[in-house]
């Protein structure tokens, strides 16, 4: 019986011990599970990053397997991505062209009207001797600006002949499916190939090419010269009217002086002796104690009649308008003139400058030097561009001239061949 009791107690103790061990093991299991979960949570950002990286590599592998091209590059992808923008430019540039041309005509005419309405009377009254030389100089610039703008906008830049054999062709246009002579490029706005194309100018609503490139550049040069003329000889008018205030009114200098006094606190209030007393708003009598001083007449502030005040407002408005517009045109067309002048010096157009740059980089990698075949030196390049050949001189540049380039835009002299023939003859 004792044995049964002992065996019963031992069995119960074993059960309790097993229960405690199971409980400890269960707690240990959940503790390990919780620790593992916390580690996974700490690793979650890395896992997400690795998952996205793996998915990205998978997408790239699929795209490359479907669209692999040995000649693909970042520039090619960029051009494809910007095709929608090119489409918008091609389709809306032709529509907006007449609006831009009208804007140029209206803005230029408005500045000319300001010069006639304000500048001419000012110099007539203040500098009559200087007026007539400025009159001649200003109209010389105006005639050249008008002539070259009209010619650049109306003269055809030149197109390859159609329906005939072009022996000078060096390639075939992918859009026209037609032969392309040297230096010819396709204009997507005009939807045709242009001889020696430089660019399509929306402000002219025309392409700039072989037969109107000189008109385009001379228009910019004379327009910049015209803005310099207006700013230089209009400075005195703007200084007197805007800065000094003219004959009537407050000028900008007064406003600046007043603002400076407020900022620096240099404006001191005048001390009044006694206390002033107004009488019928016509006199002011200083009172000191029981003694009155001599009455002082109150003078009303000077006023202008409405017509004079309105005239002064519009007078200054048009001066500021012409000044802002001419300054903006000076910097815009001035920078563009300098850039195109550098291209002319190198004997290349805007499109050729982009192509030549790529060729220079490509040949530089194989230790070769690229030579522009149409570069004959800066002096000869300018003579060819301005048409100063066959007896023509600077009169054809300083005065309006309709002379055409020497060649037909199909055949071009090659400076490399020319230099080789010269060396062989020597």
Image: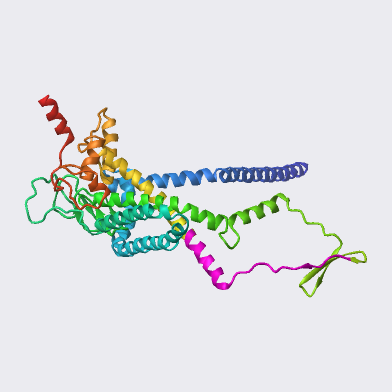
**Closest to the observer, 26 or 20:** 26
**Residue 201, visible in the rendered structure:** no
Q: Is residue 310 magenta?
A: yes
Relative height, residue 186 to residue 13 (above, below): below
Residue found farthest to the top? 426
Residue 367 at x, y percent in the picture: 27, 27
Drawn side of residue 316 relative to residue 200, left or right: right
Residue 327 at x, y percent in the picture: 44, 52
Drawn side of residue 182 relative to residue 361, left or right: left
Q: In which quadrant is the C terminus drawn?
A: top left
Residue found farthest to the bottom? 280
**Closest to the observer, 3 or 401:** 401
**Closest to the observer, 354 or 36:** 354
Quarter where residue 131 is shown: bottom left
Quarter where residue 28 is shown: top right
Residue found farthest to the left? 165
Residue 277 at x, y percent in the picture: 83, 69
Report the magenta residues as a range: 292-319
Residue 33 at x, y percent in the picture: 60, 45
Q: Is residue 226 magenta?
A: no
Drawn side of residue 28 relative to residue 424, left or right: right
Q: In which quadrant is the N terminus drawn?
A: top right
Residue found at x 60% / y 54%:
253
Residue found farthest to the front? 129
**Residue 271, visible in the rendered structure:** yes
């Amino acid at each position: 019986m004792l044995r049964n009791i002992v065996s019963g107690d031992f069995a119960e103790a074993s059960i309790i011990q097993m229960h405690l061990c199971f409980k400890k093991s269960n707690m240990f299991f959940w503790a390990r599970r919780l620790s593992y979960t916390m580690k996974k949570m700490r690793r979650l950002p890395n896992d997400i990053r690795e998952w996205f990286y793996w998915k990205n590599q998978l997408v790239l592998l699929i795209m490359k397997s479907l669209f692999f091209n040995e000649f693909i590059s970042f520039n090619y992808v960029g051009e494809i991505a910007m095709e929608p923008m090119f489409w918008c430019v091609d389709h809306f540039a032709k529509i907006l062209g007449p609006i831009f041309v009208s804007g140029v005509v209206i803005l230029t005419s408005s500045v000319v009207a300001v010069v006639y309405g304000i500048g001419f009377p000012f110099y007539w009254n203040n500098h009559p001797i200087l007026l007539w030389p400025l009159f001649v100089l200003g109209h010389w610039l105006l005639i050249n600006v008008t002539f070259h703008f009209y010619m650049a906008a109306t003269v055809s830049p030149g197109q390859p002949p159609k329906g005939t054999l072009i022996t000078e062709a060096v390639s075939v246009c992918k859009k026209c499916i037609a032969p392309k002579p040297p230096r010819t490029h396709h204009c997507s706005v005009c939807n045709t190939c242009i001889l020696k194309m430089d660019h399509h100018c929306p402000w002219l609503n025309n392409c700039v090419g072989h037969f109107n490139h000189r008109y385009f550049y001379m228009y910019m040069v004379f327009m910049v010269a015209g803005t310099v003329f207006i700013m230089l000889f209009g400075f005195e008018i703007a200084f007197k009217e805007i800065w000094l205030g003219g004959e009537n009114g407050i000028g900008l200098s007064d406003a600046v002086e007043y603002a400076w006094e407020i900022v620096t606190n240099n404006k001191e209030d005048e001390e009044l002796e006694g206390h002033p007393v107004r009488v019928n708003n016509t006199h002011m009598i200083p009172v000191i104690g029981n003694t009155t001083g001599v009455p002082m007449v109150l003078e009303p502030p000077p006023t202008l009649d409405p017509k004079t005040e309105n005239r002064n407002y519009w007078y200054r408005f048009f001066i500021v308008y012409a000044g802002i517009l001419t300054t903006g045109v000076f910097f815009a067309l001035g920078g563009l003139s300098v850039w195109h002048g550098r291209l002319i010096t190198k004997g290349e157009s805007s499109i050729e400058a982009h192509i030549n740059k790529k060729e220079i980089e490509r040949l530089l990698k194989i230790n070769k030097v690229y030579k522009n075949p149409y570069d004959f030196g800066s002096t000869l390049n300018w003579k060819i561009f301005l048409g100063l050949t066959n007896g023509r001189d600077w009169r054809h540049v300083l005065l309006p001239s309709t002379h055409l380039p020497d060649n037909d835009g199909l055949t071009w002299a090659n400076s490399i061949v020319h230099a080789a023939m010269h060396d062989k003859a020597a």
